[in-house]
Image (cartoon, rainbow, N blue to C red):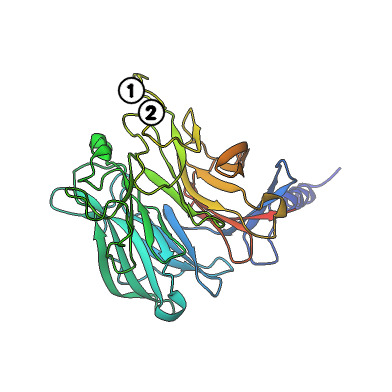
């Protein structure tokens, strides 16, 4: 009959088969099933506070934003730096705070990063975009400057949007939320609420933006009729900006961005009112409204997204991956041009709100687990 000590040792050994330490210094891993084979979900780092945005530095380290207002550098082995100095104050209430971060298109030369936040104002808050020079070794931001602020700063705690993506031509796309109670302004072209904007790295407006020169229209606007954009990625072959946005109780969308297009919110939508379930707007389609590439009803609350182009998972090449908050899953969308022909829902058993999805320079997929303050990596078994 085994002793209590030997039984405990056997228990620890059995746990190690499921939750083990990887050779790269990762903390733990678990294996899950997928349609294309089993996957190891590896914990690369933990101890983050409400992580929101993730960007890879050229040396393999990771730059991570934490919504309460801090930014950290995470080593490849998972060590967290102290918070970076120089991060401006943010409106860290509700869905606001320090949000997305991306490297500038010439980071190798100028070390500039770009980040979005809910900027506090006297009336409330507004989505702002800043750029700064990163001194990674000294753990500080220098030459911080705001290059864009939303035209309105209503009170309220919701729908700041904020995903950022640099296009191949060096212009910067940003998805802006409708601030919830101001949703009708998503259809108004004299407002930044509920829009995708396109600006240059210094905040200036590209001359070929669709509404440049049109009276009464804000020239930064690229498209309109959006609710709350929390995922954005550039298509690796076409260079088109793809986004996802939250719908109420349904009607979460994936959209391929077209200049000057109206995406319908809150007039044309699959979403329904919270509580009552009543239909919003006048229907789900209209000739002058650009249809979504894909939508979810009921809502999964989509967040960060990425096109997969790596070699680690060759069977996934060309797929679009979307993290989900309410759905607590990773959606794998198989595409045929701008059509979604199949969806696989991965990691449904983790119980994690997946805030961001990025492909790393090593060809692996990395996820921000907001629920547990972790960075996760997907490995083929």
**Residue sitting at 38 percent across and 56 percent down?**
173
Residue 104 seen in the current view: yes
Name the residue beneath numbered marker 2: 286
Q: Position of residue 377 (x, y in %)?
A: 61, 56
Residue 266 in the image: above or below residue 278? below
Crowd around label 1: few <14 · some 14–19 · many ≥20 (10 Å): few
Q: Position of residue 43 (x, y in %)?
A: 60, 56
**Residue sitting at 33 percent across and 65 percent down?**
200
Residue 69 seen in the current view: no
Residue 2 in the image: above or below residue 376? above
Residue 157 is left or right of residue 40, and the answer is left
Please state, as top left, top right, bottom left or bottom right, where the N terminus lies in the image. Answer: top right
**Residue sitting at 43 percent across and 47 percent down?**
257
Secondary structure under the numbered disc 1 in the rendered image: loop
Name the residue beneath numbered marker 1: 282
Q: Nearer the viewer, residue 27 or 303?
A: 303
Crowd around label 2: few <14 · some 14–19 · many ≥20 (10 Å): few
Residue 239 is left or right of residue 287, and the answer is right
Dividing the picture into quarters, in which one does residue 60 lie? Answer: bottom right
Residue 156 in the image: above or below residue 57? above
Residue 5 in the image: above or below residue 22? above
Which residue is most to the right?
1
Q: Which mark is residue 243?
A: none
Q: Position of residue 202 (x, y in %)?
A: 30, 69
**Residue sitting at 33 percent across and 39 percent down?**
225
CA distance for labels 2 and 1? 9 Å
Q: Nearer the viewer, residue 319 or 331?
A: 319
Please say if the residues under marks 2 and 1 sit with CB atoms less than 8 Å apart: yes
Number of numbered discs overlaid on the protein picture: 2
Residue 32 is left or right of residue 323, and the answer is right
């Amino acid at each position: 009959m085994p002793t209590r000590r030997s039984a405990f040792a056997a228990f620890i050994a059995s746990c190690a088969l499921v939750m083990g330490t990887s050779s790269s210094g990762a903390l733990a891993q678990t294996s899950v099933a997928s349609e294309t084979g089993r996957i190891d979900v590896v914990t690369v780092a933990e101890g983050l506070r409400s992580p929101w945005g993730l960007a890879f530095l050229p040396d393999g380290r990771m730059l991570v934003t934490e919504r309460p207002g801090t930014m950290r550098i995470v080593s490849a082995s998972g060590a967290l730096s102290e918070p970076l100095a120089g991060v401006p104050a943010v409106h860290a209430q509700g869905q606001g705070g320090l949000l997305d971060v991306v490297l500038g298109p010439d980071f190798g030369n100028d070390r500039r990063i770009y980040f979005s936040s809910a900027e506090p104002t006297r009336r409330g808050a507004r989505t702002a975009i800043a750029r700064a020079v990163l001194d990674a070794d000294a753990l500080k931001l220098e030459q911080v400057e705001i290059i864009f602020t939303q035209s309105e700063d209503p009170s309220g705690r919701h729908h700041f949007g904020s995903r950022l993506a640099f296009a191949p031509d060096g212009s910067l796309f940003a998805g802006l939320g409708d601030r919830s109670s101001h949703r009708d302004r998503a259809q108004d072209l004299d407002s930044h609420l509920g829009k995708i904007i396109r600006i240059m790295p210094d905040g200036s407006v590209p001359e070929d933006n669709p509404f440049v020169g049109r009276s009464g229209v804000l020239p930064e606007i690229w498209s309109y009729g959006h609710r709350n954009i929390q995922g954005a990625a550039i298509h690796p072959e076409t260079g088109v900006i793809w986004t996802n946005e939250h719908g109420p109780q349904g009607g979460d969308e994936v959209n391929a961005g077209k200049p000057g297009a109206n995406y319908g919110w809150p007039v044309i939508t699959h979403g329904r009112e919270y509580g009552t379930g009543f239909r919003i707007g006048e229907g789900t389609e209209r000739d002058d409204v650009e249809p979504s590439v894909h939508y979810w009803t009921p809502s999964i609350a989509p967040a960060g997204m990425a096109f997969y182009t790596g070699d680690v998972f060759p069977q996934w090449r060309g797929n679009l991956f979307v993290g989900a908050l309410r759905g607590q899953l990773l959606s794998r969308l198989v595409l045929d041009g701008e059509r979604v022909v199949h969806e696989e829902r991965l990691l449904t058993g983790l119980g994690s709100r997946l805030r961001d999805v990025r492909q790393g320079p090593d060809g692996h997929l990395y996820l921000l687990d907001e629920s547990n303050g972790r960075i996760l990596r997907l490995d083929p078994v």
